[in-house]
Amino acid sequence: MKVGILTFHNAHNYGASLQAYALKMCIQQMGHDVTIVNYRNPKIEGQYPQKLRPKFTKKILNPKNWKQFVYDTIRGIYGQKAWNRQWKAFDQFITEELLDNDRRLIGVDGFECLHKDAYILGSDQIWSSFLTGKLDPVYFGEFKKKERIISYAASLANGKIAESEEAAFVKLLNNVSILMKFVYGRSKYLTGGDLYIEMEEKLAEQLRQLTGREVSTVVDPTLLLKAADYEKIMTTERKLPDGKLPTEEKYVFAYFVVEEKAVEECAKKVARKLGLQLIELHYYHMPENSEANQFADFGPADFLAYIKNAEMVITNSFHGTVFSVIYRRPFYSVYKKNGRVDNLLKFLQISEKHVSSAEEIDEITEIDYEDVHKRLAEYRESSLQFLRENLK
């Protein structure tokens, strides 16, 4: 079967790029001819410019926004060099691994020439008008003729459809044959055009009420693959501050999906307790994170390599947690509220790896990864079975 994937593949974000890679590889391993369609929502495309510049909008006239404008200006001046390296690494990964070196852009009228048997919408928050500027009909399969349209773990940013968008949302969902919800819990198969969507339970219930359709569950695409499946994109070329490779020097790895003081405090405490150096990955290079052990220029391959080789991972990221589990690394997920990570840890029965502050870290305990991966394998298989059944 010829399958096309529509997602935020062009987002310069570790989770976004790796979930796209994982879904593509998984479907490819099933024997299908799969490509990621190079459709680019204009607003998403504008979030990752090659040059970091502050945005001049009417919001700047409001004094409440001046602090952010100054921050964006400093970020552009101070962080451009690191951003260039990060941007190029992502661009190379997207071009070579996701698009197979085919940079041809597909516009809203270009789908007819692709000749696909099925399209998969997702994963990621492709149904969020907050991110896409408005509900983007392409991410709902409105272009379809006879193709099968399957949603796998598509979601919204705030977990709720705005009342003003309900009618348009329901109309657009009529294009989708099969939908799936992403929640870590029990998994079951339902009949009558199941909807597979990534969201919180409140959104699932809202969709049930709006559409009259049932909702089932799947894992995040990154969990469809095993550690060995990511070796193709792995790199160990990145050197630590002392010039040694990750495999030659033990370290604690801290990944900040957003800047939070609690993550820094937890990472420093763990590094001291273990007597290891600390390596930090931030998204932007700024004066406050410009020390020799603080980086902001990694690509997706570097991100994976540093997690794989870490003695301990400290993160406030869902995908930072996911890859810690995949690579069987000791870790702590640091956050006050995060439904996605909560669900994952509860399902894997390792909720004790959630902390909200450094004070909660006392004795560092090991994780029984044999048990964890046994649970993960069962849930992964149910999601794979869903894809097999709907890609015949």
Image (tube, grey):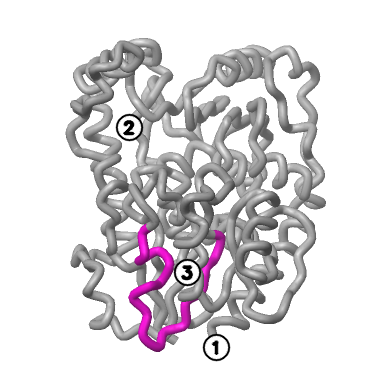
Gap in Å between the C-alphas at discs 1 and 2?
41 Å
In the image: residue 61, left or right of residue 28: left
Which residue range is magenta in the image?
136-153
211 to the left or right of 165? right
Q: Indicate whether residue 56 is drawn in magenta.
A: no
Q: Is label 1 in a helix, a strand or a loop?
A: loop
Examine the rendered structure and indicate whether residue 355 appears above or below residue 212. Answer: above
14 lies above or below 353: below
Q: Are marks 1 and 3 in contact (CB under 8 Å)?
A: no
CB under 8 Å between discs 1 and 2? no
For label 1, the residue is 392
Give coordinates of residue 223: x percent, y percent: 60, 57
How far is disc 2 from disc 3 in space, using C-alphas? 42 Å
First in sequence: mark 1 or mark 3?
Answer: 3
Name the residue located 67 percent from the left edge and 81 percent from the top edge. 192
Horizontal side of residue 172 vs 104, given as left or right: right
Residue at numbered disc 2: 297
**In percent of the image, x 66 and y 40: which residue is there?**
339
- Front one among 270 and 95: 95
Residue 231 visible: no
Residue 204, by quadrant, is bottom right
Q: Amino acid at mark 2?
A: Asp
Where does the image place residue 112, in percent across and percent down from the top left? 26, 82
Quick check: 18 above or below 264? below
Q: Which residue is mark 3?
A: 171
Task: Give the residue type that dot 1 points to.
Answer: Lys
Residue type marked 3: Lys
> In this figure, what is the number of numbered marks?
3
Reading the chain from its start, which is encountered first: label 2 or label 3? 3
Give the answer, above or below, for where 41 lies relative to 312: below
